[in-house]
Amino acid sequence: MGYISYKKALHIICQFLIIIIVVELRSCLAKNSPANFVFGDSLVDSGNNNYIISLSKADCVPNGIDFGHPTGRYTNGRTIIDIIGQELGFNGFTPPYLAPSTAGPTILQGVNYASGGGGILNQTGKIFVGRINLDAQMDNFANTRQEIISKIGSTAAMELFKHALFSVTIGSNDFINNYLTPILSKLEQKLIPPEIFVEAMISRFRVQLTRVYSMGGRKIVVANVGPIGCIPYQREINIIPVGGGAGAGAGNDIIINGSSCAVFPNELAQLFNAQLRGLVMELCANLQGSQFIYADVYHIVDDIIQNYISFGFENANSSCCYVAGVYGALIPCGPKSKVCEDRSKFVFWDPYHPSDATNVLIAKRLLDGDPAHIWPINIRNLMAN
């Protein structure tokens, strides 16, 4: 009768226990450690553009002034997704994909693929030379996905993706740095009506969001385009002077297309947003097990701008980081810029992006808001499911 030695039996038992521990660890990683996968543009870029050759960068002072140093974020402090991650208890800020340190176990907590200047359409942002558009961001996630599968196995990886937060914040550049680009825009607008351009964006976006689902994403928050006609840059280039301006924050002696914001850019954003909401509803209905969320950033930001005093701000139209212009928006924020005395009193940090204080308000609405601001459920309820 055959038998095995005590040492060999002990070895077999140890191997069996290791397998059980690994399986349990993988399951724990997938279910109990929320991961955060971020796609988008400069509104949520956490530093990817630091690692590419691009004219769109936020790697110099005074950007990141409230971090104590530039981080690659296009604001004085945190982005909206940074704040949401903190509120949900994620393990630190989600790191940029291109950072050398974004490797190993770190990726199991999520990765940020966003890029300043990036858009839905691949030609968007070409004026910056380097940028990572959404198709390329999806390719980068595919690489991360494969690496995660190799680390914890396919079953555990799919479970991790099922419970992870996926967010997509993109579309503004397709207007600002594509359709509305000065000089080129007039010709493009004559050849391509707004309805056709928006239709092309939605068509491409449908493919991209479906790809997120096909790669395992289930909890997918899709932010619409904000009131881009109200950013300092658009106010600046659309002014109709009727008197003398007095520098950043002035704006009392001008008319802007008959209203306080540039009208046409906002009309484009609203045209896109209406179709985007329909797309989100379509994807929810057609992709089994998906939870697509429509984040109405347009109306959240519009409310902040219209009622800025009640939110504790003193300025809702000018750039806190400024060099020149009626709204301080003629030149991007950089080393030669001046910074407003109290950053918490400005809705906008620079000619294009919200301040940390504004991002806090937006994040709170997305986390805990009602269906008027985020539909059909808010992010906190989404992640509790």
Image (spheres, rainbow, N blue to C red):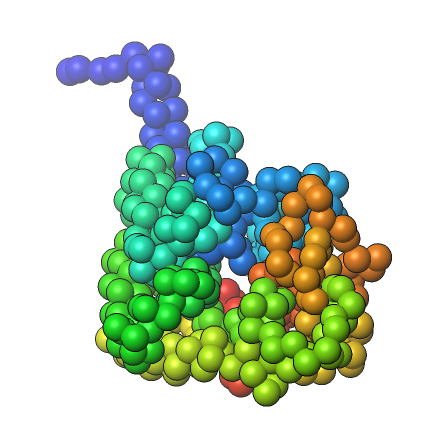
Furthest residue in direction front, as rendered: 243
Furthest residue in direction left, as rendered: 1
The image shows residue 185 at horizontal and vertical percentages of 38, 67
Identify the residue at horizontal 27%, vertical 58% (top origin): 211
- Examine the image and state in which quarter residue 70 appears: top right
Closer to the camera in the image, 310 or 373: 310
The image shows residue 92 at horizontal and vertical percentages of 61, 45
The image shows residue 305 at horizontal and vertical percentages of 66, 77
Image mark count: 0
Identify the residue at horizontal 74%, vertical 41% (top origin): 68
- Examine the image and state in which quarter residue 277 appears: bottom left
Closer to the camera in the image, 213 or 68: 68
Closer to the camera in the image, 220 or 12: 220
Identify the residue at horizontal 46%, vertical 41% (top origin): 54
The image shows residue 193 at horizontal and vertical percentages of 29, 78
Judge whether residue 369 can be spotted in this image. Answer: no
Judge whether residue 101 can be spotted in this image. Answer: yes
Q: Is residue 171 above or below residue 266?
A: above
Identify the residue at horizontal 22%, vertical 15% (top origin): 3
Q: Is residue 280 left or right of residue 90?
A: left
Query: Image quadrant for the N terminus?
Result: top left
